[in-house]
Image: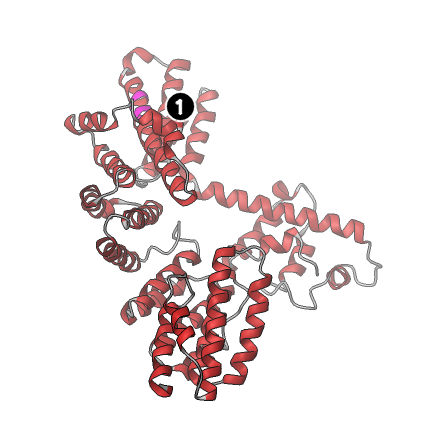
Amino acid sequence: MKEIKLTVLLKTFSAEEIKEFRKFAASPYFNEGRNPLPLINEVLKYYPDLDQPGFTKENLYSAIYPGEKINFTAFDKQLSRAAALADKFLLQKALEKDGDRTLTVHAKELSKRNLNKLFESKIKEAEAMIAQNSPYDTHYFETVRDLEVIKVDNLLGNRDSYSNKDKFFARGNYNLLDMIFKFILSIEDIALVCYEMNMDIEKSLAYKASEFIDIEGIIGMLKGSGNKYSGVLELKYRELNALMKPGKNNYLSYKELFKGNLPGMGWGAKFNSFIIVSSICIINRQHDVKFFNAELYEINKFKVDENSYAFSEELYTYLPLYVSLLSSFINNRDTEYLDKLVEKFGSRIDPAHKESFISYTYMQKMFMEKRFDDALRYHSMVNYEHNLIRINARILLIQLYYEIGYTEELLSLLDAAKKYFSAMKNYSRHKTEVILRFLKITKKLAKIKAAGSGYTEDLKNEINSDTEIQGKGWLKEKFAELEAVIG
């Protein structure tokens, strides 16, 4: 069956969510009085493989309405209603996960109805749930502020506001904390984007405003007053400072606070902080390459030790991060952390991609250890569908064929790879050129190696030029080996 909204949604459901969805779909309140269960149950018989040949509209229809001629228009409407129900189920799941905000909205509704005893009870419930969150989370102060606003609105609407003046101060205090936190985040976000896009940050309104607002002074005042959140804001300020004013001193000042605050962070805040500190190391490399490369590598190992694999604990491993860490550990020939990466991050990879990415990981490891036959065996389990590994897996296979001595297969693969990379449209032209140079040089090396002789001086100059070439270190190594044999 051609992919439809219903199957797109269901493919993301876990086995436990499928069970919950059946119950959800059975409720007349959510399914608008219609009974979608026969269709949903029939579709779910094919879960999780919703791409198998037998999964067709005709087969679904005949199973639900045996002997009847299919009415595609009417059946498509049924499928659309089932998709809308799956969409509504996801909304319900999101509301359940965002419990503190849900309780706050509930309390607001009780306040509107002057149900003050129920309102107070719901406020206590919301406060207890919010207390479980981390003040390092992006929306923490916003959530508390919203709750304080509702409490003040309740006082103004139907209570004696004069005997509860402290609640007005709380509302203002959390407004200030939220403003400072968001202001720092806004400049930080712009700084990161400007770095990635090579833009001038000084044109940003947020950056210009930072020259007139004494954030450091405000944080110092909060710290002096003993405010329990001053440490959180100081960390964010030091983070911004290390990002905006690169250098060892600002970085080390931030790093010390970062490590000290890490145990108090929630999952999402920790993951985001690791991204920021890594970015700071990358930006700072222009000042001291050796020092900040070493720092970045330590941070990469720290991420794995902390098992910080995704933006939230229930998500699958963030694959761009996995591939980045894999490259880092391979480049440093660190088999200990390569195995840790597979054990921790690898166990949380989406099942649809897990075997392929784990196989690619071990393919890289075997190649690094010069166990080329084992690397080739793992390659057979790599799926080329995911764009994060399809390019590097091709390049690695070329290197494998060269190492094993599969000359005929290698030359054929090089020709196919040249056509593939030359035809790529949604890929950086610069990166494509870098890869094409690699293919060209590898082909020359393979032909000289197979012949046992050949002119190598021009090839040597080509490899040693300042031009960027994919796998340059490996090419130099192979050329040195070839030169030692043929002279």
Find residue 143 and report its image quarter.
top left
Q: Position of residue 5 (x, y in %)?
A: 64, 51
Q: Is residue 325 magenta?
A: no
Is the residue 400 above or below the residue 38 in the image? below
The amino acid marked with disc number 1 is: Ile
Q: Position of residue 202 (x, y in %)?
A: 36, 31
Q: Position of residue 213 (x, y in %)?
A: 28, 23
Count of marks, rendered view: 1
Residue range of the region highlighted in magenta in the rendering = 172-176
> Would residue 132 be found to the left or right of residue 357 on screen?
left
Quarter holding the C terminus? bottom left
Q: Main SS of the magenta segment?
A: helix
Q: Which residue is mark 1?
A: 150
Q: Residue at x 32, y 70 (%)?
A: 339
Quarter holding the N terminus? bottom right
Q: Is residue 173 magenta?
A: yes
> Would residue 380 be found to the left or right of residue 44 on screen?
left
As helix, strand or loop, the secondary structure at mark 1 comes to helix
Q: Residue at x 28, y 15 (%)?
A: 165
Q: How are the residues colored?
A: secondary structure
Is the residue 94 above or below the residue 430 in the image? above
Residue 125 appears in the picture as rendered = no
